Image: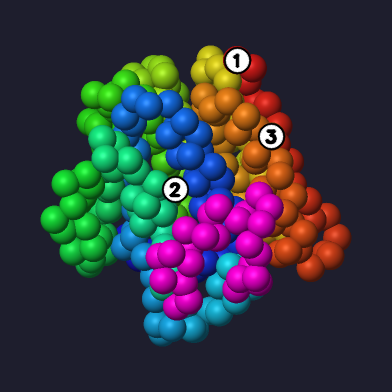
Amino acid sequence: MNYRHAFHAGNFADCMKHALVVALVRRLAVKDTPFRVLDTHAGIGAYDLTGSEAERTGEWKRGVGRLLAIEEGPLAEWLELVRRAGFPPRYPGSPALIRMLLRPRDRLVLCELHDEDSATLRTLFRGDPQTAVHKRDAWEALSALTPFAEKRGLVLVDPPFEQEGEFERMAEALATVAHRFRAGVQAHWYPIKHRAPVRAFHTAIAESGVRDILACELWLREPTDPQRLNGCGLVVVNPPWKFEEEARAILAALLEHLGDGEPGQGFAVSRLAEE
């Protein structure tokens, strides 16, 4: 409960996660029928990059700060939403980005357990009939709030990875949601510090029996230092049509603009389980 995302808002990991999440939600909106999004670790929804936390780390300057001039290509749609949300200095987290993409019949459900952050989130969306905010444990919410009445939608899981066993909890949650909500799209974000925990996570998912799983990864340096965030990944269950191609283009563009040429940098979109 000590994690505060304000220190890291707009960093390279946020850029990767948010650009891919925008692509996923856009794909859901291709069909006319309504959908729902459940964001299990919602944070405060939007962040002031002139605040003391963001200024202390300056991580956004090496992330979204490098992308300000982009107006076309695979990152353009996400960045246009970022600018519409008031950037700079306001950087939209996943709740704010997703809310901008909803149509009148779509719904957004946000969970945040941190006392202060959940209160801030509730204030941000007060009076919004399409958005519900819950102060509750994310892992419990996955069972309590799925499947969706709309029978389609996205479950976004983005834990802070400040406790032991997060990879194991995520693999278990992925299988649980797949069993309860077979048609649902899932997106699970994870850090890449060194390869061993990620390999074990991928193996657990591949052996779970869940079908149609992609792993999208971006790393800015060789992932060999367990004390440093060298990259990150997003596991996607039931990726929408054409998302795999979009993900490759998004990751390639991010690496082009955010990579500093360090040895071992790269990206990958790989299949953990076939359809």
Distance between the alpha carbons at the discs numbered 1 and 3: 16 Å
Dot 3 corresponds to which residue?
Answer: 245
* Residue that appears at 44% across and 68% down: 91
Mark carried by residue 158: 2
> Tag 2, which secondary structure?
loop
Image check: 162 left or right of 257? left
Distance between the alpha carbons at the discs numbered 2 and 3: 23 Å
- Which of pointers 1 and 2 indicates the residue nearer the eye? 1
Q: Quadrant of residue 174?
A: top left
Mark carried by residue 275: 1
Where residue 199 appears, as percent x and y from the top left, is 67, 36
- Which of pointers 1 and 3 indicates the residue nearer the eye? 3
Kind of residue at badge 3:
Glu
* Quarter of the rendering occupied by the N terminus: bottom left
Image check: 257 left or right of 188? right
* Contact, mark 1 vs mark 3 (Cβ under 8 Å): no
Instruction: Using a 10 Å C-alpha cutoff, classify the residue at mark 3 as few (fewer than 14 neighbours), some (14 to 19) or many (20 or more).
Output: few
Instruction: Using a 10 Å C-alpha cutoff, classify the residue at mark 2 as few (fewer than 14 neighbours), some (14 to 19) or many (20 or more).
Output: many
Instruction: Specify the segment rendered in magenta.
Output: 65-89
